[in-house]
Amino acid sequence: MNLDTRVQLAGIELKNPVMTASGTSGHGLELAPFFDLSRLGAFVTKGVSLGPRAGNPPPRLQETPAGLLNAIGLENPGVEAFCSGALPELAALGIPIVVNCFGEDVEKTVAVVARLDREPAVAALELNVSCPNVKAGGIAFGTDPAVLRQLVSECRPATRKPLWVKLSPNVTSIVAMAQSALDGGADALTCINTLVGCDIDVRRGRFLPSPGRGGLSGPAILPVALWAVAQVHRAFPDVPIVGVGGIRHGEDVLKFLMAGATAVQVGTATLVEPDACVRILREFEETCRELGIGRVADVVGTARVEAS
């Protein structure tokens, strides 16, 4: 049967709902030897800041039984190097390019958003609000509703491009944070960023990764991410949601769509299997055909709770 995989996400048409996740495939060119990146619905870059960042000292990654802890520290060459380097090559792919971006304070975040707004190759911006706000005592933008609302509201006038906000799960209520992002002017929400966790090297008696904590990603967080998507979709059924967290198989994509996501991002799986995105996309299409799904967009938010 014919399968229409197209989805509309905050004014952008994706030919299918599968994207990369920020931070797990660099700025894209690292994956190019493994598969044709143009097969993706969109490409999401590693986080970009106003100036270059060196990131944290090693060890910055730590494997866990069902995932990965990372404390890369948002290493990147800065927005000018990105715009003159990787962006032109990404633009040649012919798919939407979504740039994940952040700043250490509101002013720097607004500045990087304004700079990226000038680039025609950028289809949308995804705000990483898990970066600590150095002017607010190190509190992460995405854990305080008032701080998040201010950040998004000040970024909104700086760009005409769709503005996505990547929400943190390390909060009491992700729905409250979603409300703050939307009040500030967000066009779409990405659910979720990593969970805070740690490991311990018992022989050396030290916490891992090097800062003493990291962001947990991978299979372990899939149920948490699904629940976050479901909660946000129930609260804001008309808001586009991008689901991310632990996706490894085609059925996982379908789960996120049924929970309320319009599209998904594949992250940690690509670190183990560089061409995981295209395998997952192929499995997703096969599952849709098996279930008699003709139009992917019709699946969004269709999961239900059985009456007792």
Image (spheres, rainbow, N blue to C red):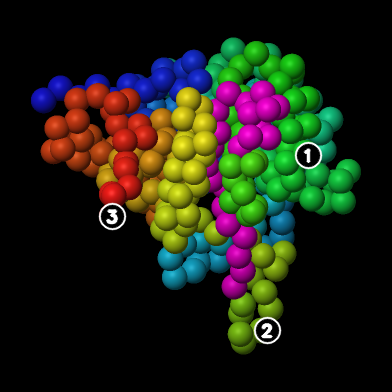
Q: What residue sits right under mark 2 in the picture?
A: 205
Q: Which residues are magenta?
A: 178-199
Q: Are marks 1 and 3 in contact (CB under 8 Å)?
A: no
Residue 138: give x, y in percent of width and height.
Answer: 82, 51
Task: Based on the picture, tell me whether residue 124 belongs to the magenta stretch.
Answer: no
Tag 2: Cα neighbours inside 10 Å, few (<14), some, or many (≥20)?
few
Image point (72%, 56%), residue name: 56
Image point (52%, 36%), residue name: 235
Quadrant containing the N terminus is: top left
Image point (66%, 84%), residue name: 204
Judging from the image, what secondary structure is the residue with disc 1 in?
A: helix
Residue 86: give x, y in percent of width and height.
Answer: 58, 28
User: From mark 1 to mark 2, how far is it between C-alphas?
Assistant: 36 Å
Q: Say what amino acid the circle numbered 1 marks.
A: Val
Res 260 → quadrant: top left
Note whether 90 is above or below 232 in the view shown.
above
Q: Are marks 1 and 2 in contact (CB under 8 Å)?
A: no
Q: Residue furthest bottom?
A: 203
Q: What residue sits right under mark 3 in the picture?
A: 308
Q: Sequence order check: which comes first, mark 1 or mark 2?
A: 1
Residue 192: give x, y in percent of width and height.
Answer: 54, 45
Q: Sequence order check: which comes first, mark 1 or mark 3?
A: 1
Judging from the image, what secondary structure is the residue with disc 3 in?
A: loop
In this view, the mark in front (1 or 3): 3
Q: Say what amino acid the circle numbered 3 marks.
A: Ser
Q: What residue sits right under mark 1 in the picture?
A: 147
Q: Sequence order check: which comes first, mark 2 or mark 3?
A: 2
Which of these two is toward me, 199 or 147?
147
